[in-house]
Amino acid sequence: MRYTNMAAGMMLMGGVAAASGINELPADADLVVHFYNTAGVGAIMLWSAKHQATTLLANAGIKARFVDCLARPEGKCADSTDPRVFILSIVVKVPDRLHGSLGYALPYTELGNQAFLNFPRIDKTAPLNTQHLLGTVIAHELAHLLFRSAAHGSGIMKEKWTALARTALAHL
């Protein structure tokens, strides 16, 4: 599968814009990320994080487009069964069992297309470089969805990142 191969590139590797149609995959993108910033992350930090994620994904051969669903007139994106459309939410509350995680993906659900980022934990983990860690976590969680797997590996797909690894990841 093409996306498995692209996601595999992310494990090996140690222009953010909206799609033209909300459920259409633009010709210049491999996937669309319906983005919900319910944590209220600032615009500059969010742009930087999306740029970081887009760059990491591009390094693995994946062209992604982000659609800000909360900015749409209806305040949400239409549901999609397209396997190339993912839903990513930045949240301030996660299930208790995941309180210590930076994010989590749900690759085993029916559509396998939802991921959540724990913004308070990300901000606490890297307060001086939050946008880069946020972007790296975005790419990490999207890779879980591309693989349709909860498995971890090396590089950005490590399960736990040390402070040194987070610094190195910020400079990818």
Image (spheres, rainbow, N blue to C red):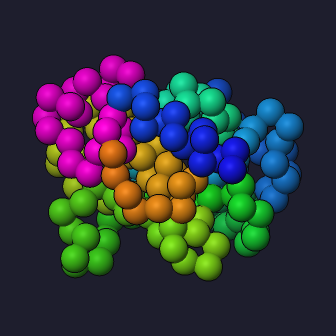
Q: Nearer the viewer, residue 20 or 115?
A: 115
**Residue 90 appears in the rendering:** yes
Measuring from the top left, give residue 53's x and y in whole percent. 49, 36
Q: Which is nearer the eye, 90 or 160?
A: 160
Residues shaded magenta: 154-172
| Residue 7 shown in magenta | no
Which residue is found at the position 69% from the left and 50% from the top?
A: 1
Query: Can you say whether 160 is above or below 118 in the image?
Result: above
Quadrant in which the C terminus is drawn: top left
Q: Position of residue 165 (x, y in %)?
A: 20, 31
Residue 107, image x, y percentages: 51, 67
All told, the count of numbered labels is 0
In the displayed structure image, the side of residue 116 where residue 35 appears, left or right: right
Residue closer to the observer: 22 or 85: 85
Which residue is depicted at the point 63% across and 30% down? 61
* Residue situated furthest top in the rendering: 171
Is residue 35 at all visible to an observer of this figure? no
Please tell me which residue is depicted at 77% across the width and 63% down the height of the picture. Answer: 82
Quadrant of residue 22 within the rendered picture: bottom right
Counting from the top left corner in percent of width and height, residue 119 is at: 32, 55
Q: Residue at x 43, y 27 (%)?
A: 13
145 with respect to 91 (left or right): right
Quick check: 75 above or below 59?
A: below
